[in-house]
Image (cartoon, rainbow, N blue to C red):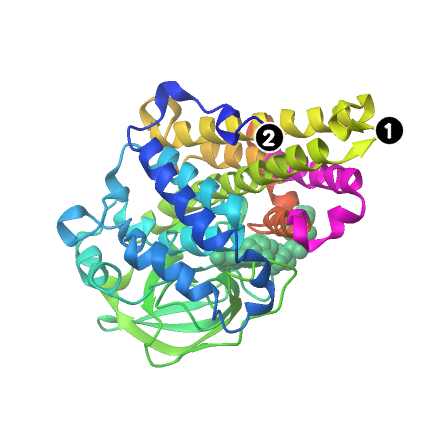
Amino acid sequence: MRSIDEITRPKEYLPPTDQVMGHIIREWAEKEIIPLRRRFDEDWRNHRIIEPAFHKLMVDMGMQRASFPEDLGGLGMGHSEHLGTSSFRVLEEISRADSGMAVAYGVTFWPLFMICNEPHVNRRLCEEFAPLFCQSDEIRFAANAMTEPQGGADIENLDLLNGSTITTTATRDGDEWVIDGHKLWPTNTGGIAHLFGVVATTKPGSDDPRDFAFILVPADTPGVTQGDPYEKAGMAADKNGDIWFEKVRVPSWYRACGPGDDFKYFKEVISIGNLGSIAMVSGCMLNVYETLQKFTSSQTLHGRPLKENDAVAGVLADVVRDVEVIRITGYQYARMIDRPDLYGERWSDEIVAKGRAYKYFACDRAVEDIAKAMNLMESCGADREWDVEKHWRDLKIIQLWMGGKQLCQMETARWFYVCESL
Ligand SMILES: Cc1cc2nc3c(=O)[nH]c(=O)nc-3n(C[C@H](O)[C@H](O)[C@H](O)COP(=O)(O)OP(=O)(O)OC[C@H]3O[C@@H](n4cnc5c(N)ncnc54)[C@H](O)[C@@H]3O)c2cc1C
């Protein structure tokens, strides 16, 4: 059988740590996650099985320290030249086992990118929050609180709406921000986040980018309430819920980058979110490819392995063609993120739009392919024993988040066709 390592990766620009890191994460996933993942669905509320598995990744293997500078106890991801390619590999390996864990892991760094990434490191905030993640024997999660009840897609539609629909307010009172608002759905909520990155407006209705604010809020600040986790179709390792901010006071210097720059660098958060989504799609589909190999080699039709039949081979080819293209596209995007000197800044409208295009391409292909794989597997496709239906549920969720498909299409068309009011 071919291994998943024979699905193409761009060897000429993989970072030196790629193999080592990939191997370590794969070993952890195969030992700690794959044997247990079928039981994760029922564990969505309490995380009794999920939490110990996370503990190994985040604390024992030290991955929750990733974003912060090395001199503060971190792993220095924020100033790595390989931030995109390394993140892609790690998220892909985790997702091959469980994309819910991958998103919970990845989103922990999402708000931290605003303060840890070159060239906009906020050293004072890194020093403030590094101990929480780098000096703890407990698991630490962070959440990126953008989506609001009136709609998430509009808030992410930065290029057109400039944050004018945000209703969560940040009001300056002396040397503090006072935050009021209601967020829903952020990954790592439902009671588990220790730190929030909150998207807020300093002037409701304003489309001036200087009124867009990104403020860090420790979860135990008075006035912050997290609701219970939602029960959703899959991804039980990712808890999502409501958060209410009622007259929440934090120091004024908890604002990540400042007027104008919060808006600008939040687009980088969007680019990296799309990169992570493609890595997760790739990881799920690598595992589907492995399962199809096993299934069509062991099942027979008219005395021959299933894979030796022409019609079946057509489906297998379509699936693996797309796995190849999704992985190559994802790595290319990771490379574009890592080489601003060649491709432009991560927060440019071009990089955001291309990320949207690649993300919805990957999701569309994968959602279509996994349905074909399940048709091929018939009742085994629905059987939890094979774990394909699990990826089917999870891939659909990846397609829905970050503004869903329509926003991806709008931003892609807007940039490539220079639309003005789309
Ligand atoms: C598992 C999971 C994890 C998530 N993690 C996070 C997270 O970490 N942080 C966070 O803040 N949110 C998170 N979300 C929320 C998610 O990003 C939002 O659900 C998403 O952005 C869409 O927002 P919405 O559900 O409010 O839909 P809406 O924005 O209300 O959109 C509803 C429909 O209208 C369409 N639409 C919107 N605008 C337009 C337009 N101009 N033209 C045409 N159609 C349009 C949309 O495509 C969609 O079909 C998560 C969601 C899930 C499921």
Question: Which residue occupies the foreground of this view, 25 or 251?
Answer: 25
Label 1 secondary element:
loop
Q: Return the x and y of residue 50 as percentages of the image width and height.
A: 47, 63
Residue at 69% in and 50% down: 389
Tell me if residue 94 can be seen. yes
Please rate how many residues cluster around mark 2, counting C-alpha atoms within 10 Å: few if below 14, some from 14 to 19, many from 20.
Answer: many
Circle 1: residue type: His
Please rate how many residues cluster around mark 1, counting C-alpha atoms within 10 Å: few if below 14, some from 14 to 19, many from 20.
Answer: few
Circle 2: residue type: Val
Pointer 2 residue: 323
Q: Quadrant of ligand 1?
A: bottom right
Q: CA distance from mark 1 to mark 2?
A: 29 Å
Name above or below for residue 65 compared with residue 413: below
Residue at 48% in and 66% down: 49
Label 2 secondary element:
helix
Name the chief secondary structure element in magenta: helix
Q: Residue furthest top?
A: 12
Pointer 1 residue: 302
- Which span is picked out in magenta? 360-388
Question: Which residue occupies the foreground of this view, 210 or 304?
Answer: 304
The image quadrant of residue 152 is bottom right
Q: Quick check: is 385 in the magenta stretch?
A: yes
Q: Residue furthest front?
A: 303
Q: Return the x and y of residue 375 as percentages of the image width and height.
A: 79, 40
Q: Return the x and y of residue 117 as percentages of the image width and height.
A: 28, 44
